[in-house]
Amino acid sequence: MPQRPYQVCTRCVMDTSALEITFDEKGTCNFCSEFFEKSSHVLFMDEDERSRRREAYIASVKAGGRGKKYDCIIGLSGGVDSSWALYLAVKLGLRPLAVHMDNGWDTELAQNNINNLMQKLGVDLHTHVIDWDEYRGLMQAFFKADVIDIELLYDNAMLAVNYRQARKWGVRYILAGTNTATEGMAMPREWNWLKFDARNIRGLWKRLGNGSRIKTFPSIGVVGFIYCEFLQRIKWENFLDYFDYNKAESLHILVEEMGYKPYPYKHYESVFTRFYQGYILPRKFGVDKRRLHLGTLVVSGQMTRKEALALLEQIPYSSGKDLEADIHYFLKKMGWTRGDLEAYLARPEKPHAMYGSEKVLYDFLSSSYNRIKYK
Ligand SMILES: [Zn+2]
């Protein structure tokens, strides 16, 4: 295939590292154009309209929770988005159960932030501690497989644990910190994988695991998702879309009122996530997810394009020393040598689909559903 000339969008900061990117005659890309088209009604919603919708949603969560111990579940990573969602929910009189999944890679900072929030907000916390030996084995299988979305493991288990708690407490509302203002730009298709692909996890394990059965890892597939979403009618909501969400302002309030300690970049509440996003993804897969995050902030008016480009000039780590410390930590925790890491980084990527997948089923069902819904 001929090498494509390098190009970066003139409005956001997405570039040709996203294989499916296209540019119009002004040099603006399809990612930010689609983001504008799909999301401007959320981003630039009239404040009266937003508060009317918010009040209606809060009222339905409260009504649904009558007579129950909790009225909603909030998945808490310790990052700004989910912490802010929890903060707002409590301030608006909701009674959430916070759910956290500990996969063994939490930073001390994240643990402290979570503990502080629990204490200051007086919220109950359910922490699901993953069986580390099994999880480590699954991670090894994902590394051996050379697939891009190693975080599929965390994300799938997190979804499973949140749904499980919702069912346990008879709660129908899961409020997520995911939102349009800071995450609304669509992820390039080749940068991650379907998060409900339990079959992919099992298939990978079968081919590359240690031969034993998966015993404790909580996972959820497409059928489980349909069961929870449509039969049990448990709904995830981008809760922060009910607010004029500005990340910097929210962080400031969390720091002032909750004793919250900020992270240098998004999703840096987990050592593995920051190592994956800051080192593995750019080095092995040529992907710098900051482009997407910073690009979204630029388009939603929370950062200038110049500021974003300046940040992208820097390494995706707080410092070279911090990166070195994380490499060391990673090697020790996974039982790898430097040579193992070098060999892994040098191997070419392989597609998830070669290990079995539910993606075709999911795509078929969601396109059929959309056809019925929008008919
Ligand atoms: Zn763009």
Image: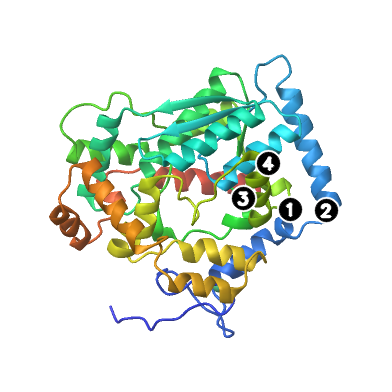
Label placed on residue 47: 2
Kindly indicate whether the residue at mark 4 contacts the one at mark 1 (C-beta within 8 angstroms). Answer: no
Mark closest to the chain's N terminus, 1 or 2: 2
Closer to the chain start, of discs 1 and 4, is: 1
Q: Tell how many labels.
A: 4
Q: Which residue is mark 3?
A: 179
Determine contact: label 1, label 3, CB under 8 Å: no
Residue 131 is tagged as none
Q: How far across and how far down the image is residue 171, in percent?
A: 62, 23
Give the number of the mark in front: 4 or 2.
4
Q: Mark 1 or mark 3: which is in front? A: 1
Q: CA distance from mark 1 to mark 3?
A: 11 Å
**Tag 2 or tag 3, which sits nearer the N-term?**
2
- Please rate how many residues cluster around mark 2, counting C-alpha atoms within 10 Å: few if below 14, some from 14 to 19, many from 20: few
Q: Which residue is mark 1?
A: 244
Residue that badge 4 annotates: 257
Q: For mark 4, give the secondary structure.
A: helix
Distance between the alpha carbons at the discs numbered 1 and 4: 19 Å
At x 57%, y 85%, the residue is 25
Q: Amino acid at mark 1?
A: Asp
Task: Please tell me whether mark 4 or mark 3 is closer to you in this view.
Answer: 4
- For the residues marked 4 and 3, what is the alpha-carbon distance in whole angstroms? 22 Å
Q: Sequence order check: which comes first, mark 4 or mark 2?
A: 2
Q: Kindly give the residue lying farthest to the right in the view shown.
A: 48
